Amino acid sequence: MATIPEIRAAVFDGPGAPFRVESPSRPTLRSGEALVRVSLCTVCGSDLHTFLGRRKEKTPCVLGHEPVGVVEEVAGDVRDVGGEPVRVGDRVVWAVAVSCGACFFCTRGLPQKCESLRKYGHEAITPQCGPVGGLSTHCHLLQGTAIVKVPADLPDVVAAPAGCATATIAAALRVGGVIKPNPLTPFPKKEGGTEPSVVLSPSPFRGGVGEGLLPKPSSVVIFGLGMLGLTACAWADALGMTAIACDVSDSRLAQAARFGARHLAKPDAVADLVKSLAQARGADLALELSGAPDASRAALDVLRVGGTAVWVGAVFPTAPVSIEPEMIVRRCLTVTGIHNYAPRDLAAAVEFLAANHTRFPFAELVSKSFPLAEVNEAFRFAEAERPVRVAVACD
């Protein structure tokens, strides 16, 4: 008879307290749930913010929302994002959000804002389920979790960030008009009827832009060159876009060049650089990934007329940003925020990494790996050295 593996989890009690590695009970799965044996979990910047007390989480909890692992147990019918059955032995990543799929926000393209939302790495420990965070030997996948299978040749250190950083960039590029969203049925079919047709009136602007078929952005300014920013540089380059990278750090700017950024600038020089490259018009798109208020404002200043700024980085309280409404109106700017992502973005993230992980040095961004028993050392290293990522090997 096979031995049932013991579960070990790094329990977080709050800022200032060390992690406790404990052995919780193995959960009894309900239909639609799965148990994954976690191979590795990378430590996101938000994990570090929580550990240091800059963000509040319910405690005690198991942190970690960038894991990759192998399915060890399945109850009932569990499907991946593509609709394929999830089976024991599948290597997978999963979304940070658990969504119902039926509430107001889920049915309006915002499942990450589900009215009954639960989030991996953000939930207090309860006796009803096993660990729901990545810093554990096992993670209990609840019903409503978006799951994506991982190709065998994609290394753990590259696959793990798909569940947060990479999928978030997929969402930012989607709302920024770079990645085409999945087609939605424009009209619901009625029983026994036909769909209405759309009739275009004669127009002198037929043949592309006049019909609303706007060209995709070809230039992007990326503010903040952590895991999000470097991923954005690589994705933009893979799509043939001109990526202009901005950061206060010389070393991060040097990394951005290796990830496809064609132009590099410090914050005080980025506006002039963008103008010189775009015939004084500005960039099509700006991604703010640092959370710094000055960068949020600068993301507007570098845009051309009709450009789009996507704010992503401010996931913690910041100082206000001063914006003149007239500037937004007269320049026809779009400003949008994106927090977390939808299931389709996770699928796009894995697809992107599978196609490009040998082209860009993603594996090098994880500077060091620690065993689960040394999780406190992993966080101390992350705090002191500020690498792009550290990893905790949980298996």
Image (spheres, rainbow, N blue to C red):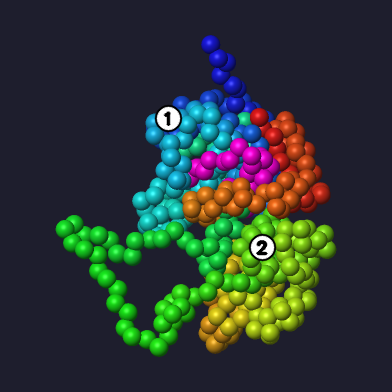
Magenta-colored span? 146-165
Residue 355 visible to the viewer: yes
- The residue nearer to you, when weighing 20 against 274, is 274
- Residue, disc 1: 75
**Residue drawn where x is 37% and y is 86% of the image:** 203
202 horizontally vs 159: left or right: left
Disc 2 residue type (three-letter): Asp
Label whose residue precedes the other's in the sequence (2 or 1): 1
Label 2 residue SS:
helix
**Residue drawn where x is 54% and y is 59% of the image:** 171
**Residue drawn where x is 57% and y is 41% of the image:** 150
**Are dots 2 and 1 in contact, CB under 8 Å?**
no
208 horizontally vs 298: left or right: left
Residue farthest along the front direction in this orientation: 207
Label 1 residue SS:
strand
- Please identify the quadrant where the C terminus is shown: top right
Nearest-to-viewer mark from 2 and 1: 2
**Residue drawn where x is 76% and y is 47% of the image:** 364
- Residue, disc 2: 237
173 horizontally vs 256: left or right: left
Residue 40 in percent (x, y) is at: 66, 37
Residue 339 in percent (x, y) is at: 55, 59
88 horizontally vs 197: left or right: right
Residue 52 sits above or below residue 369 on the image: below
